[in-house]
Image (cartoon, rainbow, N blue to C red):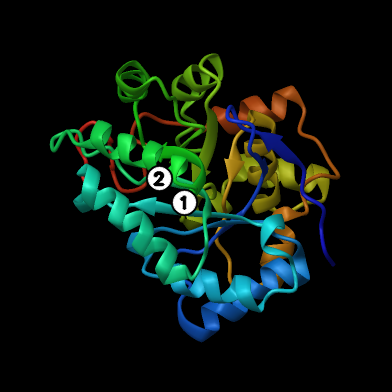
Amino acid sequence: MKQKIPEITLNDGVTIPVIGLGTYTMKGHQGAVEIQNAIDEIGYRLLDSAYNYENEGTVGEAVRRSTVPRDELIITSKLPGRYQEFDKALMTVEESLYRANLDYYDLYLIHWPNPIQDNYVEAWQALIEAKKRGYIRSIGVCNFLPEYLERLEKETGVKPSINQIELHPFFNQEEQRTWHQAHEITTQSWSPLARANDVLQNNVIQQIAENHNKSISQVILRWHFQLGAISIPKSSSLVRQLENISIFDFELNDKEMSLISGLSRPDGRINNQDPAVYEEF
């Protein structure tokens, strides 16, 4: 049942799988069982969490229960907006480690830029320091627009390894992805399946799925992979977890890729969370 997932190397030399497990809403004993099964039974090696998901402890417990060595896993968490000041950010990284009972995170991200507060450079400096202290192997961001990314590198000399952004067929982020590629920042997709039934009932993707004898979810996740984006679909079901990573035995042609990308629309964001104005604490 275990699947072997291809890997890519980030701009700082850290290697991570091209698809991972989103853990949002997975909590407590049941969540730990679901995450452990994803690791041990299905073959997931990349786990995505966040301070604000309130499940870092659950992820850590799943890792401890797993038969897979810690150094074969890539564990992610994220800094919330309310702790972006330098000292608070450093303490929050430490708290994240304590919650998960981990010695280090493989990847730690600023969850939202919160540009109105304008503390994201200070938060980035804290992550740079946390990496120097050995708390984190690779540092990145979420939901950062190109101008925010440019400012980070200009003011600190360090560019993020990853920018995790909303990316799905209804919002393909072509301009942002092109910018990332030009600046050697890896794109990671949150809500890769759009968190909605609409995309799973789309006639265009349904036809492509039938052509390949695959599910709509598999076609969408393959689309992400061929775009060069790391997707982190969330599922607690073993059957769905396996389905979501069984995408490496077929390929979408250029026309199919274009048809899926063509579903994008200017108002395609799920909850209208525009990083230029949206803030999350």
Badge 2 crowding class, 10 Å Cα cut-off, few under 14, some 14 to 19, many 20 or more, is many
Badge 1 crowding class, 10 Å Cα cut-off, few under 14, some 14 to 19, many 20 or more, is many
Closer to the chain start, of discs 2 and 1, is 2
Q: Measured from the top left, where is residue 99 in percent x and y?
A: 41, 70
Viewer can see residue 190: yes
Which disc is residue 130 wearing? 2
Q: Measured from the top left, where is residue 275 in percent x and y?
A: 28, 35
Number of labels in the image equals 2
On screen, residue 62 above or below 20: below
Instruction: Say which residue label 1 marks.
Output: 135
Q: Residue 257 versus residue 87: which sits nearer the camera?
A: 87
Q: Measured from the top left, where is residue 64 in percent x and y?
A: 62, 75
Q: Quadrant of residue 242?
A: bottom right
* Residue at the front extreme of this rendering: 133
- CB-based contact (under 8 Å), mark 2 and mark 1: yes
Left or right: where 214 falls relative to 116: right
Q: Amino acid at mark 2?
A: Ala
Left or right: where 216 falls relative to 172: right
Q: For numbered disc 1, what is the local secondary structure?
A: loop
Q: Amino acid at mark 1?
A: Tyr
On screen, residue 5 above or below 237: above
